[in-house]
C-alpha cells in the first residue's frame, strides 16, 4: 500500500499556475474603537463541480479516495443541491465537516468522480459580522483548541514568540492588523513550493504561498493569545485563466464579534481587505491537520499496486 498526496490539494495545483489577485485598497482604522458601515447579508448563487479523474492499469489493484464534501454553514453558505456522479461507499461527518469515501477496483477505462453542487454564498466579512453583532449576543465558545501549538502552526517556538513580542497594540483587532502589516513587510509571495513550510518554515524563509501566509498568520495570532484557525476551500471567481481556485485563508475569534475571516495573502497582495471580503469563498474545512486526509488539503487518495495518474478540477458553471 502506498499513500500519496492528491493533486487536488492547493500545493499541487500551484506547481502549474501563479496566483494573480485583483488590486484593491487595504485600509483599516488603527484606533482601538473601530466602526464599519452596515451591510446586508446578500447571497450569491453558484453552481460548481469538484471533479477527480483516476487513470490506472491492470497492475493497480485498488484505489481509495477520501474527499471533503461541501456542507451548509450558517452565515457562510447554504448548499441547496448536492449530487455524486458515482455513489460513495461511505459518508461521514465530524465537527461540521463532511467526507465521502470512494473505492475502485476496475480500471479498464479512466474513472471520473463528480461532486455537483449548488450553493448560496453569503458575505461573511468584518463589515457584515459587526452589523450582525449589533442585534444579537455572540455565544461563548471554548477556544483552547484554537490557541494550541500544533504541526505547521508552531506558536510556541522561540522564533515565533520573539516576533510576537514586537506586536504591542492593546486590542485584538489592532494586533491582527499589526500581524498583517508584518506579513506584508516581511514575507514575499513566492509562488508554489513543493515542501510544506508551515509557520516556522515560512518565518525562516520569508516567502510562501496562500497556505504558508495563513499558517504564519494563525501561529502569530495564537502566540498573542488570539484564537485563530485555518480555512481550506475554493474561490469561485476572480481566478485568471491558468490559475487555481483552491485556496487557504484564516479566521480569528474577536470578543463580541465571533469568528472573523481573514485572507492574509489576499490582503498582502491587495486582493481583499480586513473589512470587506467578496462572497466568493466555498468553505470546506477549518482544521490544519486532518487525520482523515492524512494531513493533506481537501482530498487524499491511496493506491494498491502500480501507481496511478490523478487529475482534479474545480469547475464553476
Image (cartoon, rainbow, N blue to C red):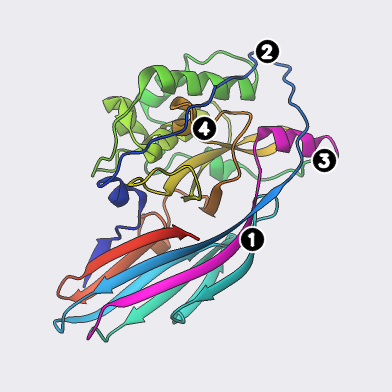
Judge whether residue 74 is colored magenta: no
- Which callout, 4 or 1, points to the residue nearer the camera? 1
State which tag comes first along the sequence, 4 or 1.
1
Circles 2 and 1, Cβ within 8 Å, touching? The answer is no
Give the mark toward the camera: 2 or 4. Answer: 2
The percent position of residue 63, horizontal first and vertical second, equals 28, 76
Q: How many marks?
A: 4
Label 1 Cα crowd, 10 Å radius (few <14 / some 14-19 / many 20+): some
Residue 222 - label: 4
- Which secondary structure lies at badge 1? loop
Q: Seen in the image, is 75 located left or right of residue 152?
A: right
Comes first in the chain, label 2 or label 4? 2
Q: What is the distance, in whole Å, between disc 2 and disc 1 at their CAs?
A: 35 Å
Tell me the magenta residue range: 108-136
Gap between marks 3 and 2, in whole Å?
A: 23 Å
Q: Residue 31 has which mark?
A: 2
Which residue was labeled with disc 3? 137
Q: Which residue is the site of mark 1?
A: 72
Q: CA distance from mark 1 to mark 3?
A: 22 Å
Mark found first going from the N terminus, 3 or 2: 2
Can residue 118 be seen at all in this image of the molecule? yes
Discs 1, 3 touching: Cβ within 8 Å: no
Q: Residue at x 47, y 70 (%)?
A: 115
- Examine the structure image and report whether residue 111 is included in the region drawn in magenta: yes
Q: Are marks 2 and 4 in contact (CB under 8 Å)?
A: no
Instruction: Count residues near mark 3 (Cα–Cα under 10 Å), then give few for <14, some for 14-19, many for 20+.
Output: few
Residue 292's quadrant in the figure?
Answer: bottom left
Which mark is first along the chain, 1 or 2?
Answer: 2
Whether the residues at callouts 3 and 2 have beta carbons within 8 Å, the answer is no
The numbered dot on residue 211 is none
User: From this viewpoint, which residue is outermost toward the right?
Assistant: 135
Amino acid at each position: 500500500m502506498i499513500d500519496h498526496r492528491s493533486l487536488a490539494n492547493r500545493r499541487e495545483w500551484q506547481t502549474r499556475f501563479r496566483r494573480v489577485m485583483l488590486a484593491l485598497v487595504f485600509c483599516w482604522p488603527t484606533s482601538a474603537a473601530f466602526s464599519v458601515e452596515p451591510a446586508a447579508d446578500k447571497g450569491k448563487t453558484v453552481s460548481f463541480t469538484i471533479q477527480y479523474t483516476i487513470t490506472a492499469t491492470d497492475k493497480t489493484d485498488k484505489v481509495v479516495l477520501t474527499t471533503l464534501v461541501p456542507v451548509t454553514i450558517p452565515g457562510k453558505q447554504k448548499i441547496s443541491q448536492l449530487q455524486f456522479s458515482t455513489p460513495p461507499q461511505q459518508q461521514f461527518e465530524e465537527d461540521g465537516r463532511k467526507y465521502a469515501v470512494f473505492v475502485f477496483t476496475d480500471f479498464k477505462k479512466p474513472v471520473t468522480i463528480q461532486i455537483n453542487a449548488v450553493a448560496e454564498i453569503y458575505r461573511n466579512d468584518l463589515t457584515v459580522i459587526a452589523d450582525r453583532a449589533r442585534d444579537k449576543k455572540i455565544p461563548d465558545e471554548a477556544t483552547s483548541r484554537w490557541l494550541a501549538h500544533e504541526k505547521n502552526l508552531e506558536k510556541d517556538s522561540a522564533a515565533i514568540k520573539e516576533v510576537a513580542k514586537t506586536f504591542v497594540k492593546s486590542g485584538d483587532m489592532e494586533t491582527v492588523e499589526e500581524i498583517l502589516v508584518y506579513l506584508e513587510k516581511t514575507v514575499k509571495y513566492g509562488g508554489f513550493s513543493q515542501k510544506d513550510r508551515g509557520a516556522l518554515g515560512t518565518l525562516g524563509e520569508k516567502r510562501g504561498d496562500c497556505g504558508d501566509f495563513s499558517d504564519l498568520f494563525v501561529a502569530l495570532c495564537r502566540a498573542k493569545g488570539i484564537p485563530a484557525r485555518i480555512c481550506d476551500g475554493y474561490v469561485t471567481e476572480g481566478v485568471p485563466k491558468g490559475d487555481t481556485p483552491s485556496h487557504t485563508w484564516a479566521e480569528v475569534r474577536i470578543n463580541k464579534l465571533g469568528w472573523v475571516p481573514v485572507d492574509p495573502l489576499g490582503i498582502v497582495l491587495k486582493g481583499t481587505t480586513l473589512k470587506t471580503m467578496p462572497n466568493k469563498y466555498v468553505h470546506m474545512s477549518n482544521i490544519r491537520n486532518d487525520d482523515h486526509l492524512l494531513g493533506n488539503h481537501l482530498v487524499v487518495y491511496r493506491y494498491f499496486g502500480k501507481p496511478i495518474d490523478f487529475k482534479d478540477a474545480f469547475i464553476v458553471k
